[in-house]
Image: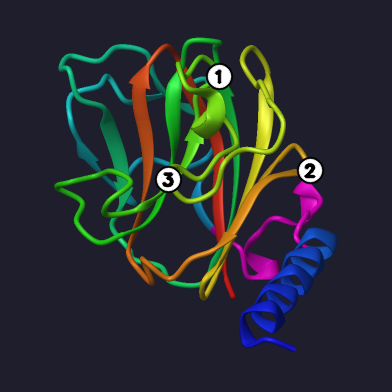
Amino acid sequence: MHKNLIYKVFNLLLILLFSACSEMPTNQLNSQNNWEIIFDGNSNLNQFTQYGSANWRIQDGSIQADLLLSKTPSYLITKKTYSNFQLYAEIWVDSETNSGFFIRCSDVTKMGADTCYEFNIWDSRPDPTYGTGAIVDVAKVSGTPKIGGHWSKIEITANNDLLIFRINGNITSSSSNNLHSSGNIGLQFGSGIVKFRKVLIKKI
């Protein structure tokens, strides 16, 4: 069997494995199960550094932003760096929101798909190929998931070169890619309204 085919089969098996075991009941997402709380309803923003000019704040137990004072997106970026992990988050957006999760960011002063993996949340993206559920410039979205107007559960797996994006229990994109191996995690705000009420991470 050709080496490339063996590699693809192996990664498919890994995707199926993580698909079967990654979704965790919310009541098990705590420090006792090796989940690190980056943010929940009892947290502050001390684990983040803000880049850009949005009105990030904690309101009603969630991180929120709904006003951007510049032409470029704003980010809350973790002070810690991460390599292999599972990320769990709960997010609310409206239909016009441009947001997302940036992982393994190598240069936090130049946030984007060139320096990070961008797991996109943007229902109204002009080209929906890399809209909500896609990993921008890495893996196109499967289907046309729309999450505007309600809370959604996000699960991101980064295990060596394996990347999996899951929204509300469904895998929306996946890929084998070794461009970025470690770095910070960023929460993005580019337009609309965004709220994050949980952000947790577990190292693999």
Q: Which residue is mark 2?
A: 169
Residue 137, numbered label: 3
Q: In the rendered view, would you say 131 is above or below 108?
A: above
Between disc 1 and disc 2, whose residue precedes? 1
Start-end of magenta stretch:
22-36
Which of the numbered marks, if any, corresponds to residue 101? none
Q: Residue 184, how many percent across, how many down?
A: 33, 58
Q: Amino acid at mark 2?
A: Gly
Colouring method of the image: rainbow
* SS class, disc 1: loop
Question: Residue 60 location, x and y as percent?
Answer: 52, 20
Front residue (pair 104, 144): 144
Quadrant into which the N terminus falls: bottom right
Q: Quadrant of the C terminus?
A: bottom right
- Distance from label 3 to label 2 (Cα)? 23 Å
What is the x, y in percent for residue 12?
74, 68
Q: Which residue is mark 1?
A: 123
**Front disc: 1 or 3:** 3
**What residue sits 68% from the left and 73% below the top?**
8
**Rendered position, 60 above or below 179:** above
